[in-house]
Image (cartoon, grey):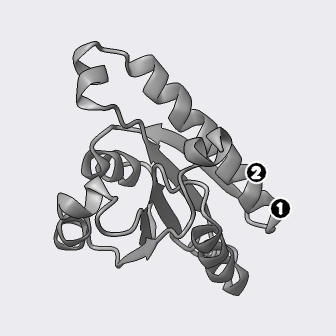
Amino acid sequence: MTHSQPRPAGILVVANRTCPCPTLLDEVARRVSDAPIEVLVVVPALNSRLRHWLSDIDDAVARAHDRLEVALADLRTRGVSARGEVGDANPLVAIDDALAHFPASAIVIATLPPGQSNWLERGLIGKARARFDAPVTHLVSTEAPLEDRRAA
């Protein structure tokens, strides 16, 4: 009886308006170059409070899906095999949901810089580090959000 090699656990990438971000994509590509690791990109479908009350959730999901597709295409150009999903608007719930079916050995969270990031204001990084076993890496995006870049 031969024992198959255990598959290395993957990297869970969580990003919203920072997705896609060259800093984030470079970091993921660097980590994957060391070993064939699966990558799952989760983009929470964020809604503004007003939109949430108007229940315009479809628009938030569509925008998250657009960002996800661009990020996955960018990762593929870097030689990274990645898949992705649109997650819950609450990033902690989105991480919980992803970890239920994706065994991650590392979690990488990308945010906008302090002062621009709702996630940082809500203490997401500290909460994620306290809640999940996998080490959490925090990257700050220096790029404008994708919607802002397209509008320019």
Residue 64 sits above or below residue 133 on the image:
above
Identify the image quadrant of the C terminus.
top right
Residue 45 sits above or below residue 37 on the image:
above
For mark 1, does the 10 Å Cα neighbourhood hold few (<14), some (14 to 19), or many (20 or more) residues?
Answer: few
Q: Which residue is rendered at x = 35% and y = 79% of the image?
A: 135
100, 16: nearer the viewer: 16
- Residue 117: x, y in percent? 32, 58
Q: Which residue is rendered at x = 27% and y = 43% of the image?
A: 90
Q: What element carries label 2?
A: helix
- Residue 99: x, y in percent? 37, 55
Q: Which residue is rendered at x = 57% and y = 41% of the image?
A: 147
For mark 2, does the 10 Å Cα neighbourhood hold few (<14), some (14 to 19), or many (20 or more) residues?
Answer: some
- Residue 28: x, y in percent? 61, 73
Residue on which disc 1 sits: 77
Q: Do residues under tags 1 and 2 come within 8 Å of each other at their CB atoms? A: yes
Q: Which residue is rendered at x = 31% and y = 50% of the image?
A: 91
Q: Residue 53 carries which label?
A: none
The residue positioned farthest toward the top in the image shown: 54
- Residue 33: x, y in percent? 72, 82
119, 106: nearer the viewer: 119
Cα–Cα span, label 1 and label 2: 6 Å
Q: Is residue 100 left or right of residue 2?
A: left
Q: What residue type is disc 2 on?
A: Ala
Q: In this view, does 74 lie to the left or right of 67?
A: right
Q: Which mark is residue 73?
A: 2
> Where, by quadrant of the figure, is residue 19 drawn?
bottom right
Q: Is mark 1 on a helix, strand or loop?
A: helix
